[in-house]
Amino acid sequence: MGGATNLPPGFHFFPSDEELVVHFLRRKVSLLPCHPDIIPTLLPQRYNPWELNGKALQAGNQWYFFCHLTQSRTSSNGYWNPIGADETVTSGGRNVGLKKTLLFSIGEPSEGIRTNWIMHEYHLLDGDCMAGGSGNSTSSSSNRKSHRKRGHSSMESNNWVLCRVFESSCGSQVSFHGEGTELSCLDEVFLSLDDYDEVSLPNK
């Protein structure tokens, strides 16, 4: 699968947070087919973020992959550290997931040098895959009973996460060759917005 999108010419992979959680992560957890099936599964501890090209799904300057959630988010050269507050992902008026933001630092956790590399880590909320996106309480209850009979617990479901990695162009951040700097509150707010193209609206 590698870094190719396998999409027809002219099509681009540009999913929203809701689409990543509902269409991709939920279906991955529920063992349902996903079309197109283009996001690979990786062991992130094997790769530094700048080594994802050709291994994760590349879409522009972003890389996507599934992985199992682990306590240790380290690689051969550094580690991922959470920054900012978790964001809630909603769909159809209800909360379906969480988006965590992490920053990659080089070196040991106690004295790491911050880089420009950012990871958005998407999680399903407990029991969301059991509901299957249905607003019908009877159907949801039936689904929960069916999953319990098969031993498919919410803890097992949330062992999967979907990750989006990109290198921020924020001026206050440094590349992994430079010295670390502190992030301001505004830096953390806009880190996730730096990688999107500017949208211009037509004049009325």
Image (spheres, rainbow, N blue to C red):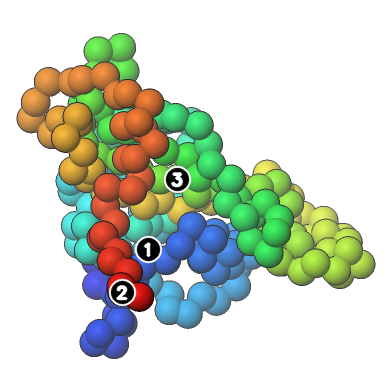
Secondary-structure class at tag 1: loop
Relative to 151, is 200 on the left or the right?
left
Total labels drawn: 3
From the image, tell me which residue sits under label 3: 121
- Residue density around tag 3, few if under 14, some if 14–19, many if 20 or more, within 10 Å: many
The residue type indicated by label 1 comes to Pro
The structure residue drawn at horizontal position 31% and vertical position 32%, both measured from the top left corner, is: 187
* Crowding near the residue tagged with mark 2, few <14, some 14–19, many ≥20 C-alpha atoms within 10 Å: few
**Considering only order in the chain, which callout, 2 or 1, is on the residue closer to the N terminus?**
1
From the top left corner, tell me how far across and down residue 186 is, in percent: 35, 31
Q: In the image, which disc is placed on residue 40? A: 1
Circle 2 sits in a helix, a strand or a loop, which is it?
A: loop
Residue that carries the numbered disc 2 in the rendered image: 202
| Residue 36 in view in this figure | yes
Cα–Cα gap, marks 1 and 3: 15 Å
User: Is 198 left, or right, of 119 in this rendering?
Assistant: left
Q: What x and y, as percent, mark residue 22?
A: 58, 64
Q: Which of marks 3 and 2 is nearer the N terminus?
A: 3
List x then y, in percent, for residue 140.
83, 64
